Image (cartoon, grey):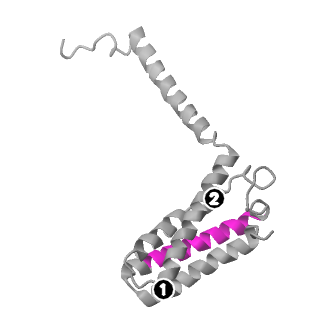
Amino acid sequence: MFGQPSKSENPASPGFRYTRTMKRFLVLFACALLATSASADDASSLVKYRQSVMKSMGAHMSAMSLVVKKQVSSRAQLAAHAEAIRGVSDGLAAFFPAGTDPSRVTTAALPAIWQRSAEFSAAAQKLQREAAKLAAFAKSGDARGFDAQFERVGAACNECHKQFRKRDSD
């Protein structure tokens, strides 16, 4: 009937308490499952992901470099490349969690990342700031400003690589 709670809607009924308890249990179980799955990434998969992200950044930088060096005249895709660098650089330090260092997996990342994590985070944040400026120049269409900022982004990458990445010849 209208206005009358059904047995399952009546807070005094055992069915209501069971349903409410079951819903709470399912919510807590789902949260625990998500937390477990989020931490279930194995170190080698995280390193592969990190390397793929870094290679994508390198590809975007290479493409923009051809334009900045005037080897390619079209600037049509610069905003997309710059935005990709900005997006991927956001939270970059999180790609280097504990357990993904060279003592546990094969990686070109140096132990200094984990030994000097504050310095590494500062370098990653510098790249984020410079990449955001690059994306802004690309959107504005300021070619001269973009080219100068591209050099700053490249310098931020190189500074970090000098301190925290094993050289290919090592």
Left or right of 29, for residue 158: right
Q: Position of residue 107 (x, y in %)?
A: 73, 57
Q: Which mark is residue 59?
A: none
Task: Tell me the quarter of the picture where residue 19 sits.
Answer: top left
Left or right of 39, for residue 170: right
Pair 2/1: label in front: 1
Q: Position of residue 39 (x, y in %)?
A: 63, 41
Classified by dominant secondary structure, the portion drawn in magenta counts as: helix
To which residue does mark 2 refer? 51
User: Is residue 89 in view?
Assistant: no
Residue at 79 percent of width and 61 percent of height: 111
Q: Distance of mark 2 from mark 1, alpha carbons?
A: 28 Å
- Residues packed near mark 2 inside 10 Å, few (<14), some (14 to 19) or many (20 plus): some
Q: Quadrant of the N terminus?
A: top left
Vertical arrangement, residue 161 with respect to residue 45, above or below: below
Furthest toward the front, the residue is 71
What range is drawn magenta here? 116-136
User: Is residue 58 in view?
Assistant: yes
150 drawn magenta: no
Element marked by disc 1: loop
121 drawn magenta: yes
Task: Tell me the quarter of the picture where residue 92 sits.
Answer: bottom right
Vertical arrangement, residue 38 with respect to residue 131, above or below: above
Vertical arrangement, residue 134 with respect to residue 121, above or below: below
For badge 2, the amino acid type reads: Gln
- Residues packed near mark 1 inside 10 Å, few (<14), some (14 to 19) or many (20 plus): few
Q: Position of residue 51 (x, y in %)?
A: 63, 59
Lower position in the chain sequence, tag 2 or tag 1:
2
To which residue does mark 1 refer? 71
For badge 1, the amino acid type reads: Gln
Q: Position of residue 116 (x, y in %)?
A: 77, 65
Furthest toward the left, the residue is 2
